[in-house]
Image (cartoon, rainbow, N blue to C red):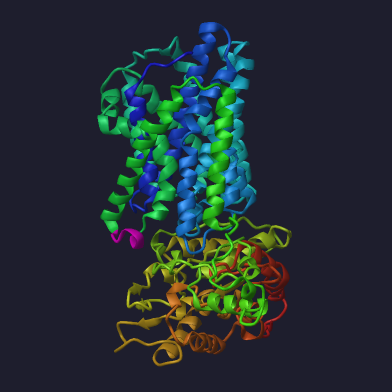
Amino acid sequence: MTRLPRTPALDGIRGLAVAGVLLFHAGVGWLIGGHLGVTVFFALSGFLITSLLLSEHEGSGRVDLRQFWARRAKRLVPALPVALLLVAAVAAWTPNPASHLIQDSVATMTWSANWWFLASGQTYADLFHDPSPLQHTWSLAVEEQFYVLFPLLLVFLARKGRAALGVGIAALLVLSVGIGAWLSLHGATSARLHFGTDTRIAEILAGAGLAVLLQQGRGWRRLSSPLVPAVGVVAGAFLVWSMVTVQDDSRYLQRGGWALTSVATCFLLAAAVQPGRIATALSAWPLVRLGQLSYGAYLFHWPLYLLITKDSAGVDGPMLLLTRLTAVLLLAEVSLRVLELPVRHSRLSLGGGLGTWAVAGTAGVVAVGLGTGAIVLPSLPPATNLPAAEAQGLPGAAQPQQQQQLVGAARQSAPRRVVVQAPRAMAARTAAPAPKHRETRQALPPAFTTDPDKYPVPPVPPSQPGQLRVLVIGDSLADNLAQGLIQWSNTRSDVVVYDLAIPGCPLSRGGERRFTDGRLFPVKKSCGWWADHSTKRWQAMHQFSPQVVVSEDGVNELFDRRLSSWSDWSSPGGNPFDDWLIGEYGNVVRSFGGASQLMLNTPCADWQRYWAFASVPDMDERVMAVNNDQGQVPDITRADLRGRICPGGQYSDTVEGQPDGRPDGLHLSPQASFALARDWLGPQVLLMQKSTKILGS
């Protein structure tokens, strides 16, 4: 088996890359480009894998693909079930686990996560406001697809000489960059460009191309030019600059920036494998050890971040960051020593490896299913102290109808934990008492824990002449509706939809809100982007130039509010709240100039399930007051969202025929959002070209 020399500086680069990702995902504000650590990983992987394959081919004239793939499996598979157990824990402790976690898990274990996330409508931005604990595994899928396909290409081209291999790699790299640029120019979504193997493979191919140039024997050729360290320093500086300045949705990245970052990484790699100060600096022990732990740290960090939050850990700021990083590194260390290295150094055959992978993967997916409630174990018959005759229905025994009524009453009185896809009729099939639920955690909903200052501005979607340009603004419910409208617009050629909603943000500006437990929650200045022409969000809106503006914002106006100019707290239905809110909505209308405006009212909700409002006794009155305020805003069209999804004014989980359409009691599932857009909201948007009357349900 061919091995490359251990090069600590390469582990150091790997350590810097994973550090960027860990800090970026932890929300460290100055590192907005930390996601580029993945690009560094890609280039380094291409460099090392191609060097290994070329070394083997050069030494023996062939490449043992079977052994290569077996080594890759033994390197990557052992830690995956551990990650799935963490995901199961996230699902078990999350009040509303995502409905697609089982599919996410299967896609992760089969190295197809990137394409699955695209097919299921997930985006990279979801990582910060509607996260799957496995979304970060998209990059592992891209790498594994490379590991499967690239060796076949290398074996074929290497027979024709190294020059042919280099030309082939360069052609594929240019093709990948070209595909990304073409898709970007023709309106592809940011998710398509971010997750696609075809658009991201250039970053790995850049490292492969460097290996073709440098690999020699069982190592890399020495470069005597004095320019090498200087170029390495410049490349390192460029990478640092990119990590502190380049946002993940930047058009620059989509049109060649990822490839340019990987080329800079290659210059740094070339310097790192030469003796000198750069190699010495990158060989510092903390960087090297972090690099050695990088796979486990990357794999485990995101589900651990979702488990270790401000509310669960009881700390915030730097202490929360330290707690998270400590947990990540400890688990990665244990996994490496106890699981990964023993398997990697074992004599396990490919067949045994595949069998172990299949068993471990199945166990992990089952654990996730149990955590989400999608898989339900059969329950034992309930214990009873009733005599046998009484239990068979003789006088004194509770009849089935009575038992179901008792179960229903117990359900209504018990705190609820919604489990998407769990069989709804399970508890009603038995005369046993209703299962005992955990008490609802007193944690802020995710929409209120995301800093709106850091919420990314989506790229402006391109529009063609004749297309109706529709902008959606508001809070997390508006974001739900926008995603449904975007899906609906993708089925048509006459509409393009742009989502600029910010979860947790009211459209009204200033002051602070008060939660039911007395916690205060200020309204960030960024929530009022619509009135600030200097913000990137306003500039993106202006570039899009919407013809129709759809707003849904009422839920975030239901809190008690206090402005500095008010003497005390005020709430919907009181003064000065109502006059002020009507004025703010009027300012919003005027800020969008000549665009037609469709304002959706505030719907009902299962307030007991949505903790932010669970103990507020007058929620229905607040909703009616805000809707009345909206009704006094001139120059808009109003749509009755409440009437549409709350039949007879009553809450229902079913929306447009979609069961579990409001999984947390407030927001819409992707399926319900699309159905609502297709059947009701989309047609109302189209009517905005022709009518400004008040639209009913």
Q: Nearer the viewer, residue 521 or 254?
A: 521
Q: Nearer the viewer, residue 244 or 281?
A: 281
**In the displayed structure image, the side of residue 551 where residue 557 appears, left or right:** left
Observer able to see residue 217: yes
* Residue at the spot 28% in from the left edge and 57% down from the top edge: 317
Image coordinates for residue 525, horizontal then vertical, percent: 37, 70
Q: Is residue 348 above or below residue 553?
A: above
Q: Is residue 245 above or below residue 631?
A: above
Q: Which span of residues is magenta-colored?
A: 310-316
Observer able to see residue 456: no
Q: Quadrant of the C terminus?
A: bottom right
Q: Is residue 57 above or below residue 14?
A: above
Q: Nearer the viewer, residue 17 or 33?
A: 17
Q: Nearer the viewer, residue 65 or 571?
A: 65
Identify the image quadrant of residue 433.
bottom right
Image coordinates for residue 90, horizontal then vertical, percent: 46, 54
Image coordinates for residue 179, horizontal then vertical, percent: 62, 38
Q: Is residue 415 magenta?
A: no
Image coordinates for residue 402, horizontal then vertical, percent: 63, 80
Q: Is residue 336 above or below residue 559?
A: above
**In the displayed structure image, the side of residue 154 where residue 588 appears, left or right:** left
How many circles with numbers are drawn on the protein? 0
